[in-house]
Amino acid sequence: MTRAQIRRQAILSGPIWPVLARMAAPGIAAMMIMSMMSIVETWFLGRIGTGALASVALVFPVFMLTNMLSAGSVGGVISGATANMTGAGDEGGAEAVLRTGTLMASVCGLAMAGFFWLAGPSFYRLLGGEDAVLEGALTYSSILMIAIPLMWQFNMLAGVLRGSGDMSTPAVIQGLVTLGHFGFCWLFIQRLDLGIAGAGYAVLAAFRPASVCCWRCSCPAAAPWPSGADRFRRRCSSRSAASPSLPGSRRC
């Protein structure tokens, strides 16, 4: 019996509280680790001055909105759909969710970046930005807009992995993102003295490899998009073979 089969059997017949605890712990750790990114960035920018902190504070709502939409509302739907298809043993459905999630991440990420690229100056003025603070916010925002599609891809693919039953891999990748962000903040802000622009480059540099890593974990490297979802097929097959289908679940 494979690990996937053992995990599925434990969910179906084991005590529910230990199962929920094991599944929730990596997600809780990932959220705590994610919060460290803003703390680290604030610490480095605080060494420059309060003006830099004020500039980044104007753009922070955009950063949080990106995370809440891609990892929360939209990403949660993708995660739930993946869990439904994987639990039902629906190989084609799981593959379709993966492709749909990737497409939605691209469209939503580009649309969001384009919107704030055009409306950003007016939005930051509405929040009270002016003079040097507004100029710093626009500098940081122009770089962050490039990173927004990558953040969408990372969070959506992490949701696919969670929905397939793999809670640990997204948490590990999030930890690596935070560590990389810390290193890039030191490099761009402190070492290269790029100031506010360095903070934007640090976010971009941290999420670029993370989105690629999540994609490679979701699909085998040998299978070109969109034909490959062998990893989902293996998970679907192992889960459907482990036990009879639940009432209302769908079979291939």
Image (tube, rainbow, N blue to C red):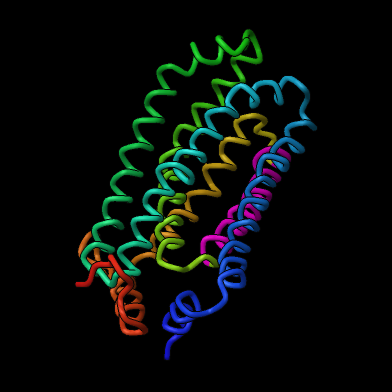
Work out which quarter of the rendered image holds the C terminus and state it. Answer: bottom left
Percent position of residue 213, x then y: 45, 61
Where 73 sits versus 33, above or below? above
Side of 52 where 209 appears, left or right = left
Write the start and end of the magenta stretch as one range.
169-191
Q: Nearer the viewer, residue 222 or 34?
A: 34
Question: What residue occupies the far front of the structure in this picture?
Answer: 247
Where 180 sits versus 248, above or below? above
Main SS category, magenta section: helix
Where 50 sits versus 42, above or below? above
Q: How many marks?
A: 0
Percent position of residue 202, x then y: 59, 42
Q: Quadrant of residue 115?
A: top left
The residue at 47%/84% (across/down) is 6
Work out which quarter of the rendered image holds the N terminus and state it. Answer: bottom left
The residue at 74%/37% (across/down) is 44
User: Is residue 213 found inside the magenta-colored segment of the image?
Assistant: no
User: Is residue 172 found inside the magenta-colored segment of the image?
Assistant: yes
Side of 194 where 112 appears, left or right = left
The residue at 67%/30% (across/down) is 195
Side of 119 where 38 appears, left or right = right
Q: Nearer the viewer, residue 34 or 130?
A: 34
Percent position of residue 221, x then y: 33, 69
Side of 101 where 54 appears, left or right = right
Percent position of residue 207, x then y: 51, 49
Q: Nearer the viewer, residue 194 or 90?
A: 90
